[in-house]
Amino acid sequence: MELQRFTLNQRIQHALLFISTLVLIFTGLSVKYPGSWGIWTYKNAYTMGTVLLIHKMAGIILIAAVILNIIYIFIDWGHRDIIPRRKDFSDFAQMLRFFFRKSGERPKFGRYAYYQKFDYWAVVFGCALLIPTGIILWFKSGAASVLPASYIAAARTIHSGEAVLAILAIFIFHFYNSHYNPDDFPISWTWWHGKISEEKMKKEHPLEYEEIAKKGV
C-alpha cells in the first residue's frame, strides 16, 4: 500500500528548484572556472555572455520557486510543519544516543524529521545569501552607484562561496538523506510521484502514520 506524501503543488515547487539549481550549478561553475570546468561549455560554442544569460534565467526561475514556496508556507498554517520545534532538538539528541548505542530506540518523527527540516532551512539560508548577492552582481553598474566597491566585491565572494557550499550540501547531505541511504539507494522516486510505502511511512514517520491511521485515510 502506498500513501500520498507530497502534493502536486509541492512536487512542482521541488521541480522548479531542482531544475533551476542544476542549471545554476553548471553555468555558475563554468563562469567561476572557465579554464577547467567551463572548458567543455566554451568548446561547445557557448560564449561567456550566453552562459551568463542562461545563469540569470535560471536565477529567475529560482526566485519564482522561492516566492511560490513563501506563499504556500505562510498562507496556510497547516503547511508549517517544516518550522523547527523543541522536539527536533530532543530528537537529534536521541538519534545521537542511538548512533552511539547508548539507546536502542530511534526517535519517532512526525511529517518531517529534524534532518529534513535542516535540509529545508539550509536552502532558505542559501537563497537568502545567493539571491541578493546575485542581483547585485547582475546589476553591477546600478549597484555601484549606491554601494561602495568593497560591498560589490564582498557580494561576489559571498555568492561564489555560498554556491560552492550549497553544491556540497546538495550532493552530500541532501542526496544521502533522500537517495543514497541504504533504504532508498540508488534513488527514491517520492519526489516524482509523491507517494511513500506504508512500511516506510511507519519506519521513518511513525507519528504522522498514527495521525493518518486515526483519520482512516
Image (cartoon, grey):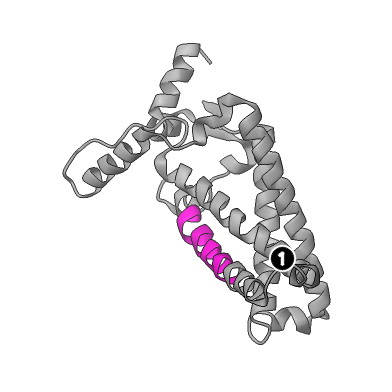
- Residue 71 point in image, percent of width and height: 68, 35
Residue lying furthest left: 102
Few, some or many C-alpha atoms within 10 Å of disc 1 (few <14, some 14-19, many ≥20)? Answer: many
- The number of callouts visible is 1
On the question of residue 12 being in view, the answer is: no
- At horizontal 50% and vertical 64% (from top left) the residue drawn is 168
Judge from the rendering whether residue 158 lies leftward or rightward of residue 101; answer left or right: right
Q: Is residue 83 above or below residue 43?
A: above
Q: Nearer the viewer, residue 129 or 94?
A: 129
Q: Is residue 174 magenta?
A: yes
- x%, y% of residue 198? 47, 28
**In x, y percent, where is residue 51?**
78, 73
Q: Residue at x 57, y 24 (%)?
A: 78
Helix, strand or loop at label 1? It is: helix
Indicate whether residue 11 is drawn in magenta: no
Between 105 and 159, which is closer to the camera in this rendering? 159
Q: Amino acid at mark 1?
A: Ile
Residue positioned 73% across, 62% down in the render: 135
Which is more toward the observer, 105 or 116? Answer: 116
Q: Magenta part of the protein: which range? A: 160-175
Residue 176 placement, left or right of 163: left
Residue at screen point 33% across, 40% down:
89
102 relative to 89 in the view: left or right: left
Q: Which residue is mark 1?
A: 136
Q: Is residue 1 left or right of residue 205?
A: right
Q: Position of residue 150 (x, y in %)?
A: 62, 76
The answer to whether one can see residue 155 in this image is yes
Our reading of the magenta stretch's main secondary structure is helix
Quadrant of the image occupied by residue 6: top right
